[in-house]
Image (cartoon, helix red, strand yellow):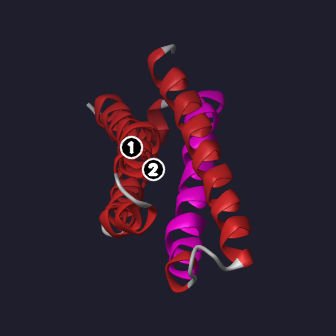
Amino acid sequence: MLRLLFTLAVAAWFGSALCVTFVVAPVAHRDFPAAEARRFLRPVFPRAHRLGLGCASLALTTLVLGRAGLPEAALARLALPVTLAFAAELVSGEWLLPRLRELNSADPRYAGLHQVMAMLNMATLGALALALAGAVLR
Protein backbone atom coordinates (compact mmCIF):
# COMPACT_ATOMS: atom_id res chain seq x y z
CA MET A 1 0.00 0.00 0.00
CA LEU A 2 2.84 2.39 0.84
CA ARG A 3 4.51 1.65 -2.50
CA LEU A 4 1.26 2.53 -4.29
CA LEU A 5 0.90 5.78 -2.32
CA PHE A 6 4.52 6.70 -3.05
CA THR A 7 4.10 6.02 -6.76
CA LEU A 8 0.80 7.93 -6.95
CA ALA A 9 2.26 10.94 -5.14
CA VAL A 10 5.31 11.09 -7.40
CA ALA A 11 3.24 10.45 -10.55
CA ALA A 12 0.73 13.19 -9.67
CA TRP A 13 3.57 15.63 -8.99
CA PHE A 14 5.38 14.65 -12.20
CA GLY A 15 2.18 14.89 -14.28
CA SER A 16 1.19 18.27 -12.92
CA ALA A 17 4.69 19.66 -13.46
CA LEU A 18 4.74 18.33 -17.03
CA CYS A 19 1.32 19.78 -17.75
CA VAL A 20 2.12 23.25 -16.43
CA THR A 21 5.55 23.30 -18.08
CA PHE A 22 4.75 21.90 -21.49
CA VAL A 23 1.03 22.63 -21.97
CA VAL A 24 -0.41 25.42 -19.82
CA ALA A 25 2.45 27.95 -19.88
CA PRO A 26 3.31 27.58 -23.59
CA VAL A 27 -0.34 27.82 -24.64
CA ALA A 28 -0.86 30.90 -22.47
CA HIS A 29 2.19 32.60 -23.96
CA ARG A 30 1.18 31.59 -27.49
CA ASP A 31 -2.48 32.61 -27.29
CA PHE A 32 -2.37 35.73 -25.10
CA PRO A 33 -0.36 38.94 -25.15
CA ALA A 34 2.53 38.81 -22.65
CA ALA A 35 0.74 40.81 -19.95
CA GLU A 36 -2.42 38.69 -20.25
CA ALA A 37 -0.43 35.45 -20.17
CA ARG A 38 1.37 36.59 -17.05
CA ARG A 39 -1.94 37.54 -15.39
CA PHE A 40 -3.42 34.16 -16.36
CA LEU A 41 -0.43 32.20 -15.05
CA ARG A 42 0.00 34.22 -11.86
CA PRO A 43 -2.37 32.03 -9.78
CA VAL A 44 -1.36 28.79 -11.53
CA PHE A 45 2.28 28.63 -10.45
CA PRO A 46 1.80 28.96 -6.67
CA ARG A 47 -0.88 26.25 -6.78
CA ALA A 48 1.36 23.96 -8.82
CA HIS A 49 4.21 24.48 -6.34
CA ARG A 50 1.94 23.78 -3.37
CA LEU A 51 0.72 20.60 -5.07
CA GLY A 52 4.36 19.58 -5.57
CA LEU A 53 5.21 20.22 -1.94
CA GLY A 54 2.17 18.22 -0.81
CA CYS A 55 3.07 15.30 -3.08
CA ALA A 56 6.67 15.45 -1.87
CA SER A 57 5.52 15.34 1.75
CA LEU A 58 3.30 12.33 1.05
CA ALA A 59 6.04 10.50 -0.88
CA LEU A 60 8.66 11.10 1.79
CA THR A 61 6.22 10.14 4.55
CA THR A 62 5.53 6.81 2.85
CA LEU A 63 9.27 6.16 2.69
CA VAL A 64 9.70 6.93 6.39
CA LEU A 65 6.79 4.65 7.29
CA GLY A 66 8.00 1.83 5.05
CA ARG A 67 11.74 2.11 5.61
CA ALA A 68 11.88 -1.04 7.73
CA GLY A 69 10.69 -3.13 4.78
CA LEU A 70 13.11 -1.64 2.26
CA PRO A 71 16.77 -2.45 1.75
CA GLU A 72 19.03 0.56 2.25
CA ALA A 73 19.87 0.78 -1.48
CA ALA A 74 16.18 0.81 -2.45
CA LEU A 75 15.42 3.45 0.15
CA ALA A 76 18.22 5.66 -1.19
CA ARG A 77 17.13 5.05 -4.80
CA LEU A 78 13.67 6.37 -3.94
CA ALA A 79 14.45 9.02 -1.33
CA LEU A 80 17.33 10.83 -3.05
CA PRO A 81 15.51 11.92 -6.21
CA VAL A 82 12.37 12.90 -4.28
CA THR A 83 14.45 14.89 -1.81
CA LEU A 84 16.25 16.65 -4.67
CA ALA A 85 12.94 17.44 -6.40
CA PHE A 86 11.50 18.64 -3.07
CA ALA A 87 14.45 20.99 -2.53
CA ALA A 88 14.19 22.37 -6.07
CA GLU A 89 10.43 22.85 -5.66
CA LEU A 90 10.91 24.57 -2.32
CA VAL A 91 13.53 27.00 -3.66
CA SER A 92 11.60 27.81 -6.81
CA GLY A 93 8.17 28.12 -5.20
CA GLU A 94 9.07 29.77 -1.91
CA TRP A 95 12.08 31.87 -2.84
CA LEU A 96 12.22 32.53 -6.60
CA LEU A 97 8.52 32.84 -7.42
CA PRO A 98 7.87 35.70 -4.95
CA ARG A 99 10.90 37.58 -6.32
CA LEU A 100 9.75 37.10 -9.90
CA ARG A 101 6.30 38.41 -9.00
CA GLU A 102 7.83 41.61 -7.61
CA LEU A 103 9.76 42.33 -10.83
CA ASN A 104 8.55 43.63 -14.14
CA SER A 105 9.50 41.35 -17.03
CA ALA A 106 11.48 44.28 -18.51
CA ASP A 107 13.76 44.32 -15.44
CA PRO A 108 17.12 42.71 -16.33
CA ARG A 109 17.05 40.62 -13.14
CA TYR A 110 13.80 38.99 -14.27
CA ALA A 111 15.40 37.03 -17.12
CA GLY A 112 18.12 35.64 -14.86
CA LEU A 113 15.69 34.56 -12.14
CA HIS A 114 13.34 33.10 -14.73
CA GLN A 115 16.20 31.05 -16.17
CA VAL A 116 17.11 29.70 -12.73
CA MET A 117 13.44 28.87 -12.16
CA ALA A 118 13.31 26.96 -15.47
CA MET A 119 16.49 25.06 -14.59
CA LEU A 120 15.08 24.09 -11.19
CA ASN A 121 11.87 22.96 -12.88
CA MET A 122 13.84 20.74 -15.27
CA ALA A 123 15.83 19.36 -12.32
CA THR A 124 12.54 18.58 -10.57
CA LEU A 125 11.18 16.78 -13.64
CA GLY A 126 14.38 14.78 -14.07
CA ALA A 127 14.50 13.77 -10.42
CA LEU A 128 10.84 12.76 -10.47
CA ALA A 129 11.40 10.63 -13.57
CA LEU A 130 14.19 8.84 -11.68
CA ALA A 131 11.96 8.37 -8.64
CA LEU A 132 9.19 6.91 -10.78
CA ALA A 133 11.63 4.58 -12.49
CA GLY A 134 12.95 3.50 -9.10
CA ALA A 135 9.43 2.83 -7.86
CA VAL A 136 8.20 0.79 -10.79
CA LEU A 137 11.39 -1.06 -11.75
CA ARG A 138 12.11 -2.72 -8.41
Which residue is at 54% across, 55% downward? 86
At 62% from the left edge and 52% from the top edge, which residue is drawn? 118
Foreground mark, 2 or 1? 1
Question: Which residue corresponds to the image point at 38% horizontal and 60% vertical from the top-left?
Answer: 37
Q: Residue furthest front?
A: 33
Where on the picture, by quarter, is residue 66? top left
Q: Position of residue 68 (x, y in %)?
A: 47, 38
How far across and how far down the image is residue 98, in percent?
A: 51, 80
Q: Is residue 52 magenta?
A: no
**Side of 115 where 47 appears, left or right:** left
Circle nearer the N terminus (2, 1):
1
The type of residue carrying mark 1 is Trp
Q: In percent of the image, x 63 and y 37: which residue is there?
A: 76
**Residue 2 percent across, percent down from the top left:** 32, 35
* 14 shown above or below 64: above
* Residue under numbered circle 2: 60
Q: Residue furthest left?
A: 1
Query: Label 2 amino acid?
Result: Leu
Q: In terms of image quadrants, where is residue 81? A: top right
From the image, give the main secondary structure of the stretch colored magenta.
helix
SS class, disc 1 = helix
Where residue 18 appears, x then y in whole percent?
Answer: 43, 37
Say what secondary structure mark 2 lies in.
helix
Question: As displayed, is residue 73 above or below residue 44?
Answer: above
95 or 100, nearer to the observer = 100
**Part of the protein shown in magenta:** 71-99
Badge 1 is on which residue? 13
